[in-house]
Amino acid sequence: MAFMEKPPPGKVLLDDTVPLTAQIEASQSLHSHTEYIIRVQRGVSTENSWQIVRRYSDFDLLNNSLQISALSLPLPPKKLIGNMEREFIAERQKGLQAYLDVITTHHILSNCELVKKFLDPNSYSVNYTEIALQHVSMFFRSEPKWEVVEPLKDIGWRIRKKYFLMKIKNQPKERLVLSWADLGPDKYLSDRDLQYAVKLLSSCSHPYIYKITFATANESSALVIRPFSEKGTLKDLIYKAKPKDPFLKKYCNPKKIQGLELQQIKTYGRQILEVLKFLHEKGFPYGHLHSANVMLDGDTCKLLDLENSLLGLPSFYRSYFSQFRKINTLEGVDVHCFGHLLYEMTYGRPPDTIPVESFPPAPSVFVVSVLESILTCEALKNGMPAVSRLLQMPLFSDVLLTNSEKPQFKIPTKLKEALKISKECIEKRLTEEQKLIHQHRRLTRAQSHHGSEEEKKKRKILARKKSKRSANESGEEHSAKYSNSNNSGSGASSPLTSPSSPTPPSTAGASSIPPAPPLPPAAPAPSTEVPTSRPDASRGALLSSIQNFQKGTLKKTQTCDYSAPRIS
């Protein structure tokens, strides 16, 4: 099978930069050991989650593998006696949860293959080193002039990208680096456009772009060969690291934290901004700037891995800028990544959190001014400044560039249009991911606020007030109904008058007609009043009968009292 032949179908394009979170849900004791049931989730969607079962020995094995990072990780210690007691298991579960929280939130550890395999064995069961060797071997069949010197094991952070030290057979002293990479989730170019674009990279000539000796691609992966630099990358310079060492060993826990000199910061920063401006003007998407992707050639910085965006690989800082909806273009991504790089050059380490609330003392106030325009909360809310604006800031505007090499990178019109569509698709996926994260953050914030003790107290007080208000309203409503029922019973006639207090007869004038029962003064009697209905007439007759009642007309009756006791 030749290198350019089509690979077997069924590839899964997984974004390895999406964070994994892990929560221990329960534990169960089986014979002489305890198993911990862990819920793992990718991203913010609860639907994208699964369960794994791990023993303490699995945690211990992972921790031993991560010792290469020289980090002090909080794994609970071993215990041989009493390790099956309920209290001990509960305490150990808390300790293991704290350990999971550390390795899933550490930017480098969370992206390494060891942690990914521990949490998601189904997605990371493939041995990518073997796959890379197969592809490289196929390549050598058609290109016999190359020869592998040794594999450069784990010198990069990507799981699906492998490196080999190489040489040309007729030039045995010259060393080159071959990188093989699988295609990523942001690969939107057609296979034909991808192969053409990757081959075109070797024709790119720019004083601040690292030269590519050879590049080729197929429908599943790509292979790129570059000269090997003994000085290493800008990250190697900052961390005082050896280029051939594993990524975890070089950058997780440096022995000495020290930033670069101010002149180095100014010069390297200006050179990187110039090459970003060049790529943006050419319409070539990048989005992969970080200090390990900047090669040092003397006092000159040169950009690496231009092929990453063509292959659809996710960015090293994606988990950072996907949190902020204003960083929604690849130009904005490049500027945000430049902020990380500038911070690292200045302070010798990456920022602890993003956004950065306050900056430590820097070699110049102009450095802080640039950092504030990129990494502060206000900057992230308003959007990233343009590269042209950064070049005009005092930190970089007075830097003199001595390199006179003329940039050359001719991109055919048809390919340029394909790159534009690919860039738009990459930005669209980023925007959709940012929207989901934003919705999840709002929901989580609302749930947290709703469940807080202060909010619970407020709800109790409001419930009491509402209960009192409803009780008062129901009492008033009951009184109003009772009053209305009494008033509606009298209709248009006067209220019932007690016999003990009769209303005096009217003296308004003489008449041969016997006087009718008088109306009370408060009762209105308009001329348009509806005639009195028959029930009101009978009520008036009843009142008249009561008023004219005479006790003497009652007949006397005799009663026999049988209530006294009878004695026989």
Image (tube, rainbow, N blue to C red):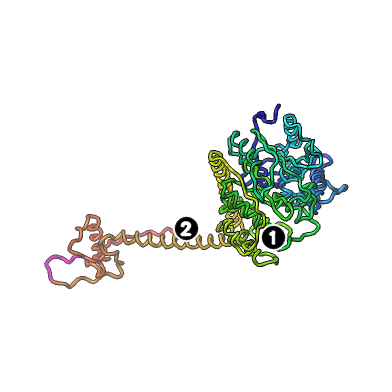
Residue in the picture at 88% in, 48% down = 81
Which secondary structure, mark 2? loop
Residue extent of the magenta highlight: 510-517
In magenta segment, residue 323: no
Residue in the picture at 62% in, 61% down = 376
Using the image, determine if residue 521 lies above or below residue 86.
below
The one nearer the camera, 173 or 442, is 173
Residue in the picture at 56% in, 62% down = 458
Name the residue tied to disc 2: 566
Name the residue tied to disc 1: 265
In magenta segment, residue 513: yes
Q: Residues within 10 Å of mark 2 (few under 14, many from 20)?
A: few
Using the image, determine if residue 191 lies above or below residue 71.
above
Percent x, y for residue 126? 73, 35
Percent x, y for residue 242? 80, 50
Left or right placement of residue 538 versus residue 453 in this view: left
Image quadrant containing the N terminus: top right
Which secondary structure, mark 1? helix
